[in-house]
Image (cartoon, rainbow, N blue to C red):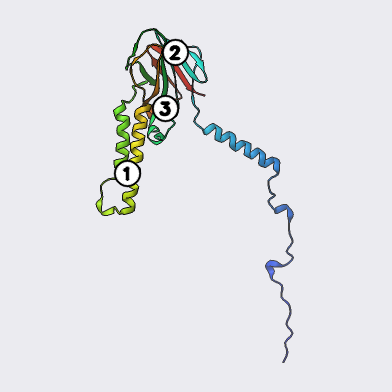
Amino acid sequence: MTKNWKRKTIPAMKNLKTNRSNLTPFPSRRGGFLLLIGSLLWLGGCLIKPYSPVPGGQYGIENRFAIVQADSLQVILRPQSYSGDAQDTASSFMPVFLRVKNTSGRPVTVDPASFSLTANGKQYDYVPLELVLGSIKTSYQLTYYDDPLALNSSDIRTREQNLERAREQYYELLNSYFSFGRILPGGYKEGYLFYNYRAGDARSLILDVMGIPVSFERR
């Protein structure tokens, strides 16, 4: 006995029509370009701006460096990022680069107490060289503490490589740190002084250069 099968229509699919007005259009080229520009502007606002000298003080300005003439010494300085293999260690501080030139005809000694910094009303003295170099040793010891059960041949090899890298950073910072003392006639010394990293959070700061205040601000 043969039954007459009828073709059924699925209710959900019945009279299905495409409504183009409900489709989400792709953004136009112009809209995408404006979105890109807006994103770049937003990112630019989030980037940390470098310090620049504030005009109007008892110092000159050139290429974002402040130039101070104090007695027989010319000092060129500005806060700036440290460049070198020891950058990871130096980033734990706020570096200030300076060059001191003896413009007289006699030897002149640079006073180690000549470069204090004030940020948000708080005074910071530069971090002594021993503490800057000690931070490399501390970082290495915290990373590779003695655990004989966890060491294998691969770990030992990696540890030796990182120890050699730490030595290289040690001597690099030793040579990059500004050396106080006597400067011969016509000679100059240059290097970095490192301050507490919290000083770098300030939008503006003042460096005391041999009694002359030098103002910087991020802009």
Q: Is residue 46 left or right of residue 108?
A: right
- Residue at mark 2: 68
The residue at 73%/89% (across/down) is 2
Precedes in sequence: disc 2 or disc 1? 2
At x 66% / y 38%, what residue is drawn? 34
Q: Quadrant of residue 16?
A: bottom right
Callout 1 amino acid:
Thr
Q: Which residue is mark 3?
A: 200
Q: Which residue type does callout 3 highlight? A: Gly
* Quadrant position of residue 211: top left
User: How many angstroms separate mark 1 from mark 3 (CA)?
Assistant: 26 Å
Report the mark closest to the observer, 3 or 2.
Answer: 2
Compare residues 94 and 203 and report the one nearer the observer: 94
Q: Nearer the viewer, residue 15 or 99?
A: 99
Q: Is residue 185 above or below residue 133?
A: above
Instruction: Please name whichever residue, 47 or 209, is drawn nearer the observer in this view of the structure.
Output: 209
Foreground mark, 1 or 3, reads: 1
Q: Which residue is mark 1?
A: 143
59 to 199, vertically: above or below: above
Farthest-out residue, bottom? 1
Q: CA distance from mark 3 to mark 2?
A: 22 Å
